[in-house]
Amino acid sequence: MVQKLIVDKLPRYIEVSSTLEFSRLVCALERAPRVSFLHEHNGKKVLSVQMDILKEKPIVYYTPFENDGHYICYGLKGGKEESEIVNSTSDASKLYSPIVRIKSLPDALKPGNGTADRYLPIELEDLSSLAKLTWGFEEIPFPLFLFPRANKWLVGVFMNFNEEGASYFCHVVLNSDPEKPFLKFTTNTGSEPLFVDNPSEHGYSYIKIIKLKETHPLVDYGHLQN
């Protein structure tokens, strides 16, 4: 019984689709860039960051990492995102996530073998509802996560409405990958939110979108409506 409780609290590691997605996750639209941790995972070097807790288990997102450097450098050039690994923070126009190198993960941070705990899905009618929900809890909105499932794409936010209750995946179903990394919206007009390449146009609010490499493994898809 004691062993079961220990396993139940071990982290779950979920891979994002690219280093650029990870760079956006830790840098874009943050009050200050998050710290990235460099360590081994399944025998390979990865960059990781914890983004949530599900029933006491840390939910960690990661990307493989083969470079050598001290910072993730993220910025916009010509309206497009760019990301690289650098050794200094000399360009004030860019955002930098410091890379902290962990020599050896303690057992408590090594991946668990999985439990039955899942996010419960709540399908929303439209992107406007998703944008309002995402913006409603924090000055800086939670990121949206995007991934394929059953010939569709799901985009949504992971959240709980109180610390003691269940955790939810509030989402919208899309017919295709929007292939743009931000959702732009405004509360000043009745216009619908739009997927855009960058968060540069003034007068709008923006939410970053993080694409996963595969279908998210911790959503209870059995509760999805057909």
Image: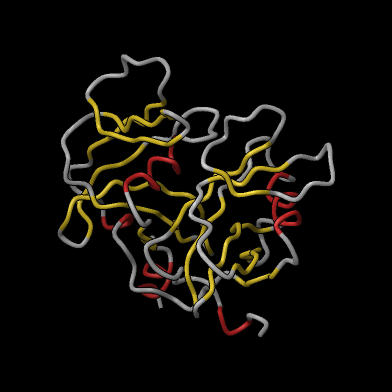
Rendered position, 203 above or below 164: above
The image position of residue 61, as x and y in percent, is 39, 54
Q: Is residue 72 left or right of residue 92?
A: left
Q: Quadrant of residue 220?
A: bottom right
Q: Is residue 158 left or right of residue 61?
A: right
The image position of residue 89, as x and y in percent, is 32, 18
The residue at 29%/46% (across/down) is 47
The residue at 30%/41% (across/down) is 37
Frontmost residue, 94 versus 65 = 94
Quarter of the C terminus within the rendering: bottom right
The image position of residue 218, as x and y in percent, is 48, 71
Q: How is the image coloured?
A: secondary structure
Frontmost residue, 66 versus 196 = 196
Q: Given the current orientation, which residue lies at the most extreme front position?
A: 78
Rendered position, 5 above or below 69: below
Rendered position, 163 above or below 19: below
Quarter of the N terminus within the rendering: bottom left
The residue at 68%/36% (across/down) is 205
Frontmost residue, 119 versus 21 = 21
Q: Is residue 84 left or right of residue 103?
A: right
Q: How many marks?
A: 0
Frontmost residue, 73 versus 197 = 197
The image position of residue 160, as x and y in percent, is 66, 58
The residue at 36%/35% (across/down) is 82
